[in-house]
Amino acid sequence: MADAASAISVGSLELVGQGQIPDNPILQCVQIKPMASQNGNERYRVVMNDTRNFIQGMLAQQTNHVITDGKLKKGSLCRLTSYQANFVKDKHILIILDLDILEEYGEPEKIGTPVALEAPKQEATAEDVKPQPGNIAGNGFYGNKPQQAQEQQQQQRALPSRTNGASHSGSHGNIYPIESLTPYGHRWTIKARCTHKGDIKTWHNKNGEGKLFSANFLDDSGEIRATGFNDAVDQWYEVLQEGSVYYISSPCRVQLAKKQFSNVNHDYELTFEKDTQIEKAEDMDGVPQVRYNFITLSDLQTVDKDNTIDCIGILQDVGEVSEIVGKTTSKPYSKRELTLVDNTGYNVRLTIWGKTAENFDARPESVIAFKGVKVSDFGGRSLSLLSSGSMTIDPDIDDAHKLKGWYDGSGRNEQFQSHANTMSAVSAAGGNDRNAYKTIAQVRDENLGMGEDTDWFSIKATIIYVKQDNIAYPACLSEGCNKKTVEIDPGQWRCEKCDKTWDRPDYRYIMSVNVSDHTGQIWLSCFNEVGLMIMGITANELMAMRDEGDERRVTEAFADANCKTFGFKCKAKMDTFQDQQRVRYQVQYANPLDYAREAKKLADMINLYKIQDDSLFVR
């Protein structure tokens, strides 16, 4: 076996203590200890030895595999190829970003008689002296003595860093890796790429109102989420751009991550404060692009419900934009369903939301990479792109090139298994499928809505009449309210829910339309979003015509609405009106017919017959 003692970079840790960063030092790992984590992801502390001194360290999460794969063990020799040295709570600490395990030296016992690397002796000004709890040290860890654990005034400073041989220096001082950020560190700066910037969101409740936005930042050690509220939205939202690299410096609050709102793998998250410093970095070297951890579609069955994953696939089918209304907020949300396939022989339905759904323009057979999608067990396995997630069409990465090559070579003609949840090309065959198209006669014959539960169905039908009475109601102008207002005085419209009075209402459609297909007619109830599609003008415009007495234009507007054909997604439920029970058919959303997709569905239905040679049909 090779001589391990002669391979170690003796004295290299002393150079670290003097503020230098030796290139690729070879050290011995003399202790490994797991750290507690907030989200169940393992983190590891290590102690490194150069025969004279030892130093505590922490592995970045992307290097955990050397332990989980059984490569790094107690006694192993390793070469640190990328690391950073920090000084926290009178202790030197290494943040190890990448390392090579020198397996040829085995796992010898501790080499030499190392002692703890001493803290540099220097005077500290009163301004710099602050109590800092140690985020790396722990009782019983290598080199710690319980009797030494006492409160004291301590200085924190960061030593120069080196990543792949490049030193971060200059006006921004020492750059901290994102992986090492904790609530206990102060006066830090990170250099990171903005990989995602969400939309501005607003809230309104009894305690007041406000706005916020969130963004994700990535460096070569990890990724973290940052949120700005109110003034920070005005200050930083337009400054931060996806894909650009920024220096972000404290004061910036570091707190426990709210995992229900985040798709990044970090125990903490940032909140921008009044004096947070953000500056665009001209030098983008050493800062990676978006980092993915793809799960294949066949492995979705092994992923627990509500977990967040990354996936990549070929876009096989694109659904129409539809709209749902949130149960708690009563706000409408746009959605679009996509079907993805990959080279494992599976397909899956993935839902995108909001502006992403409305502006989606990827062509079928494109490669799409998704970061931050939530796994659902609805009908088997389905995916949903979170608001904090991102989507990249035809990314320039190896996984995308391999997938495209497979699809062009053989995948286009393959048959794919389903997790019992993808959009069916021939949905008319789906008996209890809520997306199944039915005729109006089937809706009545099957007594949809007669039971205790709500029944869902879809129909393709043409509008033959729009009821002109009570076509709209005066709604509150508060965002997300939509409650009916009452005119208490001329030009005074009051909303009881918001306790506000407006000089005008926002009229919203609430209409009844009679639609027909080749089997019959049916009355449907429609709300504002569907009404806009049917009428082609807003309810405010229509009511203004009526107030102006322009009956000719009003009549033309209703006439133009007739004879339009849509695909209607409906729900049927028993309703009581004037002491009489009846089934109410309510439209959730409507889409104009996509004739190319409709033709493909009909062709697929014909193919289901699989005409044989002895068939009586003429081919």
Image (spheres, rainbow, N blue to C red):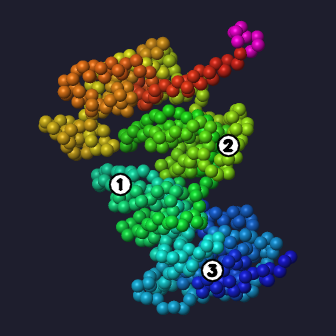
Mark 1: few/some/many CA within 10 Å (<14, 14-19, 20+): some
Quadrant of the drawing holding the C terminus:
top right
Report the Cα–Cα distance between label 1 and label 3.
Answer: 44 Å
| Nearer the camera: disc 1 or disc 3 | 3
Q: Earlier in the sequence, mark 2 or mark 1?
A: 1
Q: Against 184, is 477 above or below?
A: above
Residue located 51% across and 20% down the image: 438
Q: Secondary structure at mark 3?
A: loop
| Nearer the camera: disc 2 or disc 1 | 2
Three-letter code for the amino acid on which mark 1 is drawn = Lys
Which portion, as a residue range, is magenta?
Answer: 612-619
* Residue annotated with mark 1: 211
Q: Residue 445's x, y, as percent? A: 49, 15
Farthest residue, direction top = 616
Report the Cα–Cα distance between label 2 and label 1.
Answer: 41 Å
Question: In the picture provided, is 313 more to the left or to the right than 206?
Answer: right
Farthest residue, direction right = 1
Tell me the chief SS of the magenta region: loop
Report the Cα–Cα distance between label 2 and label 3.
Answer: 43 Å
Question: In the picture provided, is 351 more to the left or to the right than 64?
Answer: left
Q: Is residue 561 magenta?
A: no
Q: Against 310, is 33 above or below?
A: below
Residue located 47% across and 40% down the image: 359
Q: Residue 152's x, y, as percent? A: 47, 85
Three-letter code for the amino acid on which mark 3 is drawn = Ile
Three-letter code for the amino acid on which mark 2 is drawn = Lys
Rendered image: mark on residue 21: 3
